[in-house]
Image (spheres, grey):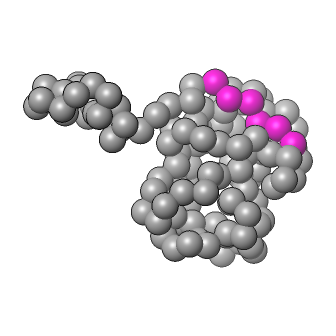
Amino acid sequence: MGIAARMMGGGVSAFQARAINGDVAPTLSAAGTTQGTATSLKASINVITTAAASSGVILPSVEIGDEVEIMNLGANALTVYPDSGSRVNAIATNGGFSLAINTAVKVRRFSSTRWAAYLSA
């Protein structure tokens, strides 16, 4: 049973449980070849099902402590960019990192301009 289902079993409304648990974008396409043209992510869990060569996604501008998950199920690696003016791990500000095919990453904002990325195997 998922977390939302357990919360609802404890008396939390379905709407509140889903809002707390996060939303899922199950079929996204990566686009663009720069931070400014990449597909903007809006959900907390994002599944990329189409990724043309050199395409990318950009993380949303979120609150400190928020997490975003990305799973690349596309045919090519994609580039994950931070929101404008931010950086991920030790990568340069506004620089992206490559997310391989069939790989997931969880990123957490830990300051107003920094993200930490946790890559799957």
* Magenta region: 27-32
Q: In this orientation, does residue 47 appear?
A: yes
Residue at 55% in and 39% down:
43
Residue nearer the viewer, 70 or 86: 86
Which quarter of the picture shows residue 46?
top right
On the rendered structure, is 75 left or right of 86?
A: right
Which quarter of the picture shows residue 56?
top right
Image quadrant containing the N terminus? top left
Residue 80's place in the image compared with 29, above or below, is below
Residue 40's place in the image compared with 61, above or below, is above
Q: In this orientation, does residue 100 appear?
A: no
Q: Is residue 92 magenta?
A: no
Residue nearer the viewer, 60 or 103: 60
On the rendered structure, is 45 left or right of 57?
A: left
Residue 48 in picture, x, y percent from top left: 66, 32
Residue 96 in picture, x, y percent from top left: 75, 59
Residue at 65% in and 36% down:
72
On the rendered structure, is 112 left or right of 64?
A: right
Q: Residue furthest left?
A: 10
Residue 65 in picture, x, y percent from top left: 43, 63
Which quarter of the picture shows residue 73?
top right
Residue nearer the viewer, 33 or 13: 13
On the rendered structure, is 10 left or right of 3?
A: left
